[in-house]
Every structure is written in C-alpha cells, then in structure tokens.
Image (cartoon, helix red, strand yellow):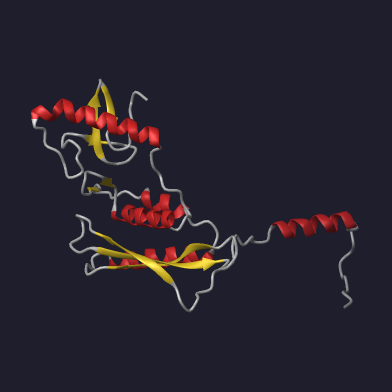
C-alpha cells in the first residue's frame, strides 16, 4: 500500500542486510526460554504419605507427594514429584498450606530442576522462634519441616543424594561418643531419648542437641562436627 508523505523530507538512511540480521538476532534473544515442558497428569499416579507431628500443632500433618515416572522402559527411567497435598484436622494453617502446596505442585509440573525448593523451604524461620523435635533436633519453622519432608522424598526417589558420614567418620563419632559416655557414666548424667546428654548444646551443622565439650573442644556426638576440626 502506498503512503503519501505530506512533510518535507530532511534526510533518509538505507537499512543494510547486516542491520536486518542484527535486528533479527536482538529479537531472537528477547524470546522467553522455556526451561522444561509442563508435565501432563497420567490417569494413574503413585506416591508416599508422611506423618509429621510437631509441638506447634495439636494434630499431625499428613504430607502426600505423588510422583510420575519419566522415560518408561529406557535407561533414563526415573521418578520425579508431580504434586503435593497436606491434610490435617488442624485448620489453623489451612489457607497458607493450601496456597503453598498449589504453588509447589505448579513448580513440580513445570518440569526442570525442583530441588531448589528444599533449601528455600528449610531457610524459612518462624518469627517467634522454632521448636525442638524428639531427640533434640531443632526445626526453625513448620514450613522448614515441610521442606525436610520434601528433601527426604527427593532422596528416596534418587533426585538428591542422602547425606551421611563415611565409614571412617562413623567410626570416629562412635569412638568419641563411647569415650564421653564412659567418662560420665559415674556421674549419672541424664540422657535424652536419642542417647545424648541433656546438657548438650545445639549443633549448627545437623541442628541436633548433641554438642558437648570434649578434650577442650566443642564436638557433636551426632555428626562429628568439631570446632577444632
């Protein structure tokens, strides 16, 4: 279609093939990159349900994580989380739990790497302070405990490696614990349900009340963490 120009032309410039190529490249770089294709829900799905009892809720939480199997029948066959539900008789946290699980399920279905959710959830701290679980393990918030359940599930399906001490470290921790208990057996020092002294302090590495002063050094009887290396 012809366009009539009413104003006086004061200058002009020609667009070269190089300019067109640069413009096309810039437009291509501005496109949104999809990290993974959204997953479709199969007719049948399997999962695991975890019971979580905390001192901040009257009733237990039941966390269900359902998985889908990818690349069935190939060497790359693996499971990955697809959706998460949390149920409880306690309705105090109902709204934010529903919102949280819907967002998490959307992330699961989006595909790609979802392991980042673990650290994001575990780094949430309750403003009024966290709580101690059985055995003296500290949990900073209810959200962080949900993150620990997700971490446990991802470890069980192989998306995350299970942390743990090697054979040498396990032997060293066992020797340290036996040595400490032998020295303090005569004092009748009270122990908690996990077999650690009730006077033990919280270990910053494993969040367990199992750190004691041994040989002039703060040492954890659970994970072996020591201020002296």
Q: Is residue 210 left or right of residue 22?
A: left
- The number of discs equals 0
Which residue is at 26% across, 45% downward? 138
**What is the quadrant of residue 190 in the picture?**
top left
Asked if one can make out residue 11 in the rendered structure from this viewpoint, the answer is no
Residue 69 image offset from top left, x and y in percent: 51, 67
Residue 101 falls in image quadrant: bottom left
Residue 170 screen position, x and y as percent: 34, 36
Q: Is residue 172 visible?
A: yes
Locate residue 225 relative to residue 134 in the image: left or right: right
On-image quarter of the C terminus: top left
Front residue of 107/148: it is: 148
Compared with 4, 123 (above or below) is above
Image location of residue 148, percent across then percent down: 35, 53
Pick the front one: 4 or 153: 153
Quadrant occupied by the N terminus? bottom right
* For residue 70, side relative to residue 177 (left or right): right
- The residue positioned 48% from the left and 55% from the top of the image is 159
- Tell me the residue at 90%/62% (across/down): 9
Q: Nearer the viewer, residue 5 or 179?
A: 179
* Near-viewer residue (60 or 3): 60
- 58 sits left or right of 153 in the view: left
Q: Report x, y in % for residue 140.
A: 29, 48
């Amino acid at each position: 279609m012809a366009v009539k120009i009413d104003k006086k032309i004061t200058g002009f410039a020609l667009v070269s093939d190089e300019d067109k190529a640069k413009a096309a490249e810039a437009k291509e770089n501005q496109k949104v990159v999809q990290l993974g294709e959204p997953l479709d829900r199969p007719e049948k799905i399997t999962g695991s349900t975890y019971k979580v009892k905390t001192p901040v809720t009257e009733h237990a939480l039941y966390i269900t994580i359902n998985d889908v199997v990818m690349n069935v029948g190939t060497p790359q066959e693996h499971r990955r989380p697809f959706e998460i539900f949390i149920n409880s008789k306690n309705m105090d946290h109902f709204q934010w739990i529903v919102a949280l699980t819907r967002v998490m399920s959307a992330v699961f279905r989006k595909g790609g790497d979802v392991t980042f959710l673990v650290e994001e959830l575990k780094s949430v701290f309750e403003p009024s302070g966290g709580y101690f679980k059985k055995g003296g393990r500290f949990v900073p918030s209810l959200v962080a405990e949900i993150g620990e359940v997700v971490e446990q599930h991802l470890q069980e399906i192989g998306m995350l490696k299970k942390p743990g001490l090697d054979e040498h470290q396990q032997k060293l921790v066992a020797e340290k614990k036996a040595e400490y208990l032998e020295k303090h057996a005569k004092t009748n020092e009270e122990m908690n349900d996990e077999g650690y002294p009730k006077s033990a302090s919280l270990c910053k590495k494993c969040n367990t009340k199992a750190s004691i002063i041994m040989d002039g050094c703060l040492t954890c009887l659970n994970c072996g963490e020591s201020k002296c290396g």
